[in-house]
Amino acid sequence: MKIRSVQTRVVEIPFTDSGKGQGITPTTWNTLETVLVRVEDSDGHVGWGEAFGYFVADATRSVVERLIKPLLEGQEVDSVATWNLRTQRQLHLFGRYGITMFAISGVDMALWDLYAKRAGKPLYEVLGKGRKTRLPTYASLVRYNDTEVAPQICRQAIDDGFDSLKLHEIEMAPIEACHQAMAGQVPISIDVNCSWDITSARDNLQRLQQMNNISWLEEPIFPPEDFAALNSLRNAQVPIAAGENWCTEQQFRQAMQAGAVDYVQPSVSKVGGVSEFIKIMHAADQYQTGVLPHSPYFGPGFLATLHLAAAFPQTMQVEYLYVEPAAWLIDLQPIRQGPEFVLGEQPGIGLSPDEDVIARFLRP
Ligand SMILES: [Mg+2]
């Protein structure tokens, strides 16, 4: 396919979550920033991608505009994976994790969508063998750091039809309050975003091991790529998960070789796009490691994650960020059934961003 144009836009949609918006991110988090990538081929087919944008949207966008677009426009792309690897080589000076790889991820995703659309097939069908088109999600709550609000939001998510939850709490008091509110009946995972040191991780793990129905502990320690330390935390009762801050199959393979985790968590808009995600799936299969994709996205990144989950059976659950956006960048209603998403036969990633919503929330 010959690429005629590469276009980027940053869309910033406010959201509410009944919390203070503080803790997980460096400054207050109350908008969903999406770096949208639109590629068009010489036949007029269009593919959509999403590069990781939260708090760094302008930087990510500028890498696409300044470095990737000039290398891609006018070029023939026969294999997206080959294009991806070539681009990684060309841009390796600018970092093997972070903004550069976020930018490559978004363009790679758009190229895969385009490729599947040209083939007239849904992306999951182009990708693989599993074809499990009904995908379960769990409600991923933001951090409330409050022993009253956090349990209320847990109840609200269950009332909304979710049957499993993830907390981003880092203190044991709100974690225990939520667990108690659910009476241990609902599977809960705990994501501490690398907040604990190894000693408190060990102590808190012991307390989590006393609680029933804890599905996993996510990113317990800093730095997230300390595979030996992660390995030392593995135990029989509470599985350890990490990976949203690892990049490319190379690093995931090293992590699995080191026995770092029970479950890996690649993020399609950070990890090198669909191409690297596929390779990680094959490595996870080889190491018999479960996959829990990181996907707090509402754009093409969420849809691409669903298609990857459909294509590769080792995916356990998909993350759904439990917040209320002021508008839906992509209307997910047609594929939503309670906590599950059901993919149909539409080509590519299936749905497209809403141009009216883009226009309304476009960042200048
Ligand atoms: Mg996480």
Image (cartoon, grey):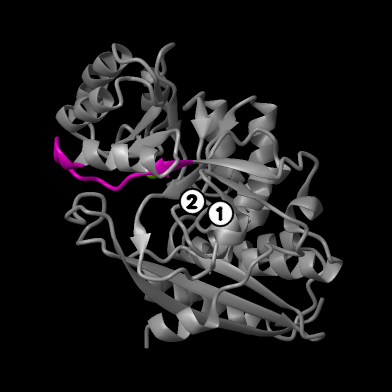
Q: Which residue is drawn at 30% across and 37% down?
A: 155
The boundaries of the magenta stretch are: 138-149
Looking at the image, is mark 1 or mark 2 earlier in the sequence? 1
Q: Which residue is outermost to the right?
A: 119
178 relative to 333 in the view: left or right: left
Q: Give the Cα distance between marks 1 and 2.
A: 7 Å
- In the image, 129 versus 88, the foreground residue is 129
**Residue 170, image quadrant:** top left
Badge 2 crowding class, 10 Å Cα cut-off, few under 14, some 14 to 19, many 20 or more, is many
- In the image, 294 versus 102, the foreground residue is 294
Please state the horizontal and vertical placement of residue 105, each as a whole percent of the image. 57, 62
Residue type, label 1: Val
Q: In this view, does 277 lie above or below 252?
A: below
Callouts 1 and 2 close, C-beta under 8 Å: yes
- In the image, 113 versus 83, the foreground residue is 113
Q: Residue at x 69, y 28 (%)?
A: 286
Q: How many marks?
A: 2
Please state the horizontal and vertical placement of residue 40, each as a whole percent of the image. 70, 82
Q: In this view, does 252 lie above or below 303?
A: above
50 relative to 122 in the view: left or right: left
**Residue 219, image quadrant:** top left
Please state the horizontal and vertical placement of residue 346, each as a whole percent of the image. 75, 63
From this viewpoint, is residue 278 visible? yes
Quadrant including the C terminus: bottom left
Q: Which residue is drawn at 50% across and 56% down?
A: 270
Q: Check if residue 277 falls in the magenta segment.
A: no
From this viewpoint, is residue 193 visible? no
Please state the horizontal and vertical placement of residue 107, each as a whole percent of the image. 61, 69
The residue at which mark 2 appears reads as 295
